[in-house]
Image (cartoon, rainbow, N blue to C red):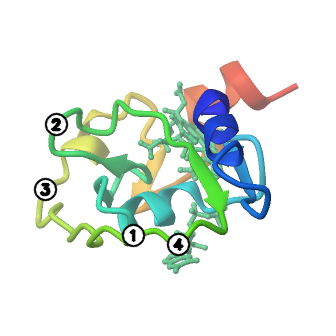
Amino acid sequence: MKALTNSLLELGSGIQARCYADTGPVQDKVWAQQAGIGWIAKNGNVITREYGSWVFLGEILTNLDLTPDVPHTQHCGSCTRCLDACPTGAITNPFVVDANKCIAYHTIENR
Ligand code: B12
């Protein structure tokens, strides 16, 4: 993403571009959904048709005049596989993750 950002900056002196990948106050999931990558699913993450939710998100903010993609539609329907599968029951309700029950919170963030 840094390489792409740098190549955008080299397109012209008036061009601004800055990238984030879980590194700033950006609504990663909403913009991924708006960009047509997937939809915000009941597990609290963006799910894609190709990779499920096994993707990391990043974005480049730029003043380039780009043609927007079509937002993705929601396809969870009545499925509850993620709620049923979570070993600690951290997905307490559809779209709601209780970080205190989430293993990822305790292994990555809790210090
Ligand atoms: C806090 C956080 C966590 C917390 C809480 C997770 C949660 N689901 O709530 C903990 C530590 C538990 C966690 C764990 C994990 N995380 Co995390 N996490 C984040 C982080 C840093 C912030 C999310 C957040 O709370 N934002 C603030 C709230 C208010 O916003 P929100 O959740 O997006 O929801 C709001 C918006 O959608 C808004 N909204 C709704 N409609 C609209 C429309 C518009 C136009 C706008 C502007 C806004 C808007 O309203 C919602 C409610 O306020 C994001 C990175 C990021 N910048 O988004 C990564 C992120 C969500 N995590 C990620 C990952 C990969 C994980 C783990 C898989 C890590 C791991 N290896 O285990 C686990 C998965 C757990 C799970 N099932 O969610 C990825 C998910 C990728 C994806 N496929 O979606 C992200 C996006 C990081 C990234 N850039 O890749 N995470």
Q: Which mark lies nearer to you, 4 or 3?
A: 4
Q: CA distance from mark 2 to mark 3?
A: 17 Å
The amino acid marked with disc number 1 is Gln
Q: Picture coordinates of residue 107 (x, y %)?
A: 68, 19
The residue at the far left in this view is 78
Q: Is residue 107 above or below residue 44?
A: above
Task: Give the mark nearer the N terminus: 1 vs 2.
Answer: 1
- Residue at left offset 63%, top offset 49%: 11
Q: Which mark is residue 79?
A: 3
The answer to whether the residues at label 2 and label 3 have Cβ atoms under 8 Å apart is no
Q: Which numbered disc, 4 or 1, marks the residue that appears first in the sequence? A: 1
- Cβ of disc 1 within 8 Å of ligand 1? yes
SS under mark 3: loop
Q: Earlier in the sequence, mark 1 or mark 3?
A: 1
Q: Where is residue 111 shown, x and y percent of the image?
A: 88, 25
Q: CA distance from mark 4 to mark 1?
A: 16 Å
Circle 3: residue type: Cys
Nearest the eye: 35 or 82: 35
- What label sits on residue 34 in the rendered view? 1
Q: Which residue is mark 2?
A: 50
Q: Nearer the viewer, residue 87 or 51?
A: 51
What is the spatial separation of the Cα atoms under label 4 and label 2, in whole angstroms? 28 Å
Q: Mark 4, residues whose alpha carbon is within 10 Å: few (<14), some, or many (≥20)?
A: few
- Which amino acid lies under the numbered mark 2 shown in the image of this protein? Glu
Asked if ligand 1 lies within 8 A of label 4, the reply is no
- In the structure shown, which secondary structural element does the residue marked by tag 2 occupy? loop
Whole-percent x and y of residue 26? Answer: 68, 59
Q: Answer yes or no: do the residues labelled 4 and 2 have beta carbons within 8 Å? A: no
60 sits to left or right of 46: right
Q: Which mark is residue 65?
A: 4
User: Which residue does the image show at 61% across and 62% down from the upper left?
Assistant: 27
